[in-house]
Image (tube, rainbow, N blue to C red):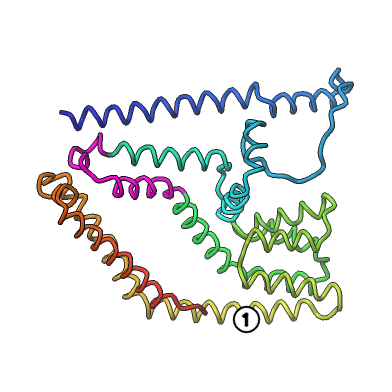
Amino acid sequence: MDAFFYGFVVLLFAAVILAFEGFYLWWMSTHGAAARRIARRLQVMSGGLGSRSGERISILKQRRYSQAPALDRLLHRFKPAHGIDALLVQSGASWSVAQFVAASFGGMLLALMLPLALPAAAGMPAPVRALVAAGGLLLPWGLLRRKRMRRLVRIEHQLPEAADFIARALRAGHSFTNVLQIVGNELPEPLAGEFRVAREEINYGVPMNEALHGLAARIPLTDLRYLVIAVLIQRESGGNLAEILGNISQIIRARLKLVAHVRVLSAEGRMSAWILGLLPLVVMGVMMVSSPDYITMLWTDPSGQRLLWIGVGMIAFGVVWLRKVIRIRV
């Protein structure tokens, strides 16, 4: 009965938090500073009284880290927030930095409340609870890293087709800026969206060099950097850009073929790393539910605590070692 009660408490707490978050987002979208600013601009365009306000509009491009202006200014002064924002951009997530921070602290709070939901975890020592809390804190970061990796892999496989497409369009007589628009309209996502962003930046007056450097910053792939460098060198020194892009496309396809071959050869090692790393955690979780009196000896008895730390250290060492063995850079 206690487990159901504590589970109900946790779900009620999450529901209250989500309700407050929903109310806050609704209020900011209808009565916040951004909504008022949009209303004033609409009045200016329609010739209303708002045209007399003399609002100063910044032409600097700066991403908002939060819908609340005060929190946005505070996060812009916090240097790690810039790295979080870069991770969000590269992963293609729609979160803001403030939402990511809130999700991280929410995961840590839920991890700290784990002993309330599982009676077997009530006697965990403080270091183990700290590790669990750190895992909850880093869970959104790990999910974003995984999403970023999957997105970059998809873009990497789209790059050869994009290079061939640009080369064919250039041979047909299109200018490079028009080619960016065509690529953004014809190719699939997510690569097409990044080319559309570069095209829009150029339309707004950003120099092409800066727009292409921004494209390379949003997509940190070596193959894309080669493509950007080829375009920039051709603009300064001349040459047959279509032929260069065709050669780059062939090189990318050959490298991707070699990478796929290496992944096939290392599949057994990667599967062994996943199984050996997750099996102890899964078994411990099952035993905490089925036999809590048996598993609690690991953190209530001094000998069990030593064995627990030794086991955690050996698992971490084994995972890192297997990762070094199977990770082959091509």
Quadrant including the N terminus: top left
Q: Residue at x 63, y 73 (%)?
A: 223
Residue pictured at 82% horizontal, 35% vertical: 57
Q: What residue is at 57 percent from the left and 78 percent from the top?
A: 253
Q: Pointer 1: residues within 10 angstroms few (<14), some, or many (20+)?
A: some
Nearer-the-camera pick, 56 or 321: 321
**Residue 34: % across, % down:** 69, 29
For the stretch drawn in magenta, the main secondary structure is: helix
Q: Is residue 227 above or below residue 106?
A: below
Q: Residue shown at 57%/44% (left/top)? A: 94
| Image label count | 1
Q: Residue furthest front?
A: 302
**Element under label 1?**
helix
* Left or right side of 281 for 216: right
Q: Residue 320's x, y, as percent? A: 37, 69
- Residue 130 screen position, x and y as percent: 34, 47
Give the residue type at disc 1. Answer: Gln
Range covered by the magenta-colored residues? 115-140
Q: Quadrant of residue 187?
A: bottom right
Examine the image and state in which quarter residue 307 appears. Answer: bottom left
Query: Dot 1 corresponds to which residue?
Result: 250
Residue 113 drawn at (x, y percent): 31, 36
Q: Is residue 294 left or right of residue 173?
A: left
In the depicted view, which residue is nearer to us: 102 or 305?
305
Q: Quadrant of residue 275?
A: bottom left
Q: Is residue 316 left or right of residue 54?
A: left
Q: Is residue 120 magenta?
A: yes
Tell me, yes or no, whether the highlighted magenta stretch contains residue 168: no
